[in-house]
Image: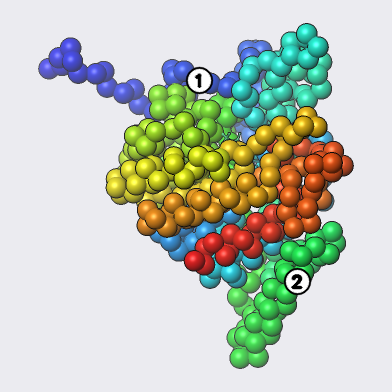
Amino acid sequence: MSTASESAPEPPWSPASWRDRPVAQQPAWPEAALRSATDELREIPPLVFAGEARSLTDALALAANGEAFVLQAGDCAEAFSAFSANSIRDKLKIILQMSVVLTYGTGVPTVKIGRIAGQFAKPRSSDTETRDGVELPSFRGDIVNDFAFEAEARRPDPQRLLRGYHQSASTLNLLRAFTKGGYADLAQVHAWNQDFVTASPEGRRYETLAGEIERAMRFMAACGIDLNAERKLHEVDFYTSHEALLLDYEEALTRQDSITDDWYDCSAHLLWIGDRTRQLNGAHVEFLAGVQNPIGVKLGPTIEPDEVVALCKRLNPDLRAGRLMLISRMGQDLVADRLPPILEAVRDTGQPVVWACDPMHGNTFTHSSGVKTRRFDDVMSELRRFFDACYTAEVWPGGVHIELTGENVTECLGGTDEVLGDHLEDRYETMCDPRLNARQALDLAFQTAELLRR
Ligand code: PEP
Ligand code: CO
């Protein structure tokens, strides 16, 4: 018999159950056009399949247990305009280079996850943007509306969901070809170094390391090991991820696995919940609680330890290793204060999470020239403090989450081949947050490997 004090039973989860919850950060879609676009998405093939998401869960379980390290990296926002084989290849190159540096430097495998093939939608701090007295809807990423500051361009257009899906499919197709078809072969380790990187101190350091790897492989071959037969030397597992922001899109790509009957969001292998949409009773948490993909959660400086514990319980009630990656993005000033009580609280619940650091999003500021930037030194300082906090709490620092591009852009300040304030505008190309260029990213990988070796 129920009493008035008992709360009503939770309705069962379904891919649509998020619709009964408060939902943040959704565009004001025109309804009929949205329905027609999502009806089409529901019918077309998934981008990834459930077995791959399970393999990533297994790989992340190793990272939760101190036996692997996660590198999650890519653009802040992919663009419809910057879509080419070269840009995909160059992003893959720098991620492969960083992975080699991390794996060689630490002796544990690197789990490679791109912010790619679906990282289009952006949360915004304001629904509108005002310029010279004109107020228009904010730009929310190419999958929603257009960057140009014009009324027509800023109108959310559901056909963009389909274009985003198709660009993701082509991107993923090329990534699969590169990573399984010979390009990611360790024998190519020199070829990943791009010209503008080779000339830098990090580039030269990388060349030395690549030479050592080649020597080690020649040594193994001389010992009679058949290197051709070792699949793992010739191809890599590369996973995709994005922020699961647009729930209409994610729902439409959510499918029931025929092997396990479980639900998977087949838009990417890993989905993460952003710092602005992590409300315990909100729609994003409800949606991701029910899909079986590995899930990331960004933890900004306003979150309290008991909220993190509650989120873990809701998203991973069965304490499955590899299901959850908690991504601290506190900022270099706050991380030493804010993170330790969270690490301890979660550790004490026995949650086998991957602890990762996003040293980018808490360290953004507006330069006097008016553009958004980040200092390489602040990024490194947050990473160092994150590692310190993990070591003190006796948890494994399991990964980094970085915004980068393979190109020689000038969006973040500093690094060994220093980008100075006056250079910011030379090649400032991001539509959203400032990204590390390939040299800065490689530098970060070398320094992170040193932190991990401690
Ligand atoms: C992002 O990763 O681009 C982002 C918006 O992050 P956060 O939710 O941590 O602010
Ligand atoms: Co960003």
Q: Secondary structure at mark 1?
A: loop
Above or below, 377 against 131 in this view is below
Which quadrant holds residue 435? top right
Circle 2: element type: helix
- Kind of residue sitting beneath label 2: Glu
Residue sitting at the far top: 133
Q: Which residue is nearer to you in this view: 13 or 66?
A: 66
At 73% from the left and 74% from the top, the residue drawn is 208
Contact check, label 2 and label 1, Cβ < 8 Å: no
Residue 57 makes an appearance in the image? no
Q: Residue at x 60, y 70 (%)?
A: 104
Give residue 257's position: percent from left, percent from top.
47, 42
Can you identify the residue that label 2 sits on? 207
Whole-number angstrom distance, CA of label 2 to CA of label 1: 49 Å
Amino acid type of disc 1?
A: Val
Q: What x and y, as percent, mark residue 167?
A: 73, 38
The answer, for residue 7, to whether it is visible in the render is yes
Q: Position of residue 408 (x, y in %)?
A: 82, 50
Q: Which residue is tagged 1?
A: 23
The residue positioned 58% from the left and 59% from the top of the image is 448
Q: Could you tell me which residue is drawn at 46 percent across and 55 percent down?
A: 388
Q: Position of residue 275 (x, y in %)?
A: 52, 32
Neighbor class of circle 2 (other Cα within 10 Å; few <14, some 14-19, many 20+) is some
Instruction: Indicate left or right for 292 with 203 as reference.
Output: left
* Along the viewing direction, whichever of 208 and 165 lies nearer the viewer: 208
Residue 208 placement, left or right of 295:
right
Q: Nearer the viewer, residue 229 or 22?
A: 22
Residue 351 sits above or below residue 209 on the image = above
Q: Residues within 10 Å of mark 1 (few under 14, many from 20)?
A: some
The coloring applied to the image is rainbow
Q: Earlier in the sequence, mark 2 or mark 1?
A: 1
